[in-house]
Amino acid sequence: MLEIRLNRKYSAKSIIDGLNSAVAVDIGKDIYQINRRDEVVDELDKLYGLDFSNRYVRKENLAIHHSEIINSVYTTP
């Protein structure tokens, strides 16, 4: 579904690799550090109106973003 939503600009494998490269590490007090990003993650940010450009994210924001992505992936635009 993401491959289609990204207009087939990226293969399914490159989308999976991109998502796997965006790792959030718990650094304490419900704050996560976002490590490594790539072009696919940047495109998904634009597509879903998210902003993971910040290096640090609160846990509740990760949960909100996760819900938004799940809902929009399974909703027809």
Image (cartoon, rainbow, N blue to C red):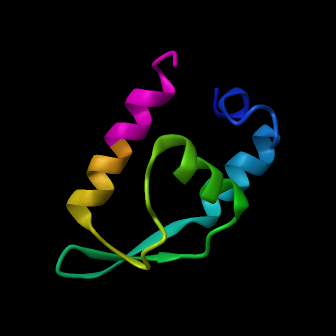
Residue furthest to the left in view is 29
Q: Is residue 71 located in the magenta-colored stretch of the structure?
A: yes
Residue 44 in the image, given as x and y percentages of width and height? 58, 48
Q: Is residue 73 left or right of residue 30?
A: right
Q: Residue at x 70, y 36 (%)?
A: 6
Q: Is residue 19 above or below residue 4?
A: below
Location of residue 60 by image quarter: bottom left
Location of residue 22 by image quarter: bottom right
Q: Residue at x 25, y 64 (%)?
A: 59
Q: Is residue 40 located in the magenta-colored stretch of the structure?
A: no
Q: Is residue 52 left or right of residue 60?
A: right
Q: Residue at x 77, y 38 (%)?
A: 12
**Magenta stretch: helix, strand or loop mostly:** helix
For the N terminus, give its image quadrant. top right
Q: Residue at x 35, y 49 (%)?
A: 65
Q: Is residue 7 left or right of residue 76?
A: right
The residue segment tinted magenta is: 67-77
Residue 69 in the image, given as x and y percentages of width and height? 43, 39
Badge count: 0
